[in-house]
Amino acid sequence: MRTYKRLQIEGGCYFFTVNLANRQHNDLLVREIEALRDAFRQTRADHPFEIDAIVVLPEHLHTIWQLPPHDSDFSTRWRLIKSRFSQAIKTGEHISESRLKKGERGIWQRRFWEHLIRDDVDYARHVDYIHYNPVKHGHCARAADWQHSSFQRWVDQGIYSIDWAAADATRELSFE
């Protein structure tokens, strides 16, 4: 069995990508957005953290979290969010034999991807990546048109203009 080593920094700021197990033709996360929001709310009540930026797409999500000082346990938070969401929605998804043997549902990929934010430039690039993602995947022509995102909050704070990442302006964006 593999041992996954994760860089856990107390009070760290992290970018995450979390995927559904079945990403093809699956709109579960946006279809069940209220269950996902509830799972986040309940988990944040028990294990506080700040969500700096987030986008929920049909079959995956990206987010940046700021953990509290003296706390580095993002894995428990993700386990709770995934579990609470899974418990809140109807059954019926395909479940592999290995998941059946372990009593698991077939909703989420078992792991997630995390990246410790290194500095302000790294932070800004990941925030831009999050808010541009619905445009990148063809779900909308402008970041402002995607309702399952923190983009509007950033517009309200004066950080982005409402027309940021419009399809005709994306040539100027670089996420390299």
Image (cartoon, grey):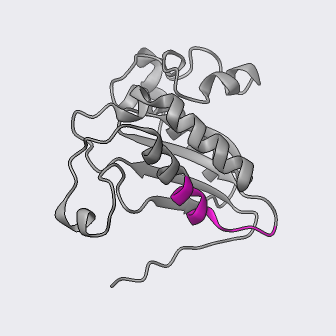
Q: Count numbered badges in the picture.
A: 0
Where is residue 116, by image quadrant? Answer: bottom right
User: Which residue lies at the image location 46% right of the left edge and 42% below the top edge?
Assistant: 61
12 part of magenta stretch: no
Which quadrant does the N terminus fall into?
Answer: bottom left
Task: Give the main secondary structure of the magenta stretch.
Answer: helix
Q: Position of residue 133 (x, y in %)?
A: 44, 34
What's drawn in magenta, residue-wise? Answer: 70-80
Q: What residue occupies the far right of the structure in this picture?
A: 69
From the top left corner, tell me how far across and down residue 15 is, in percent.
56, 53
In the picture provided, is 151 more to the left or to the right than 153?
Answer: left
- Residue located at (52% from left, 26% from top): 148
Q: Classify residue 170 by image quadrant.
A: top left
- Residue 36 shows up from this direction: yes
Q: Is residue 8 left or right of residue 29?
A: right
> What residue lies at 34% left-to-right and 56% top-to-bottom?
109
Q: Is residue 121 visible?
A: no
Where does the image place residue 144, in percent across and percent down from the top left? 54, 17
| Closer-to-camera residue (100/164) | 100
- Whether residue 37 sits left or right of residue 134 in the image: it is right
Q: Position of residue 165 (x, y in %)?
A: 50, 23
Q: Is residue 114 above or below residue 175?
A: below
Which residue is farthest left? 97
Please report the residue visible at 25 percent of the width from the left and 43 percent of the height from the top.
93
Q: Is residue 62 above or below residue 97?
A: above
Q: Quadrant of residue 164?
A: top right
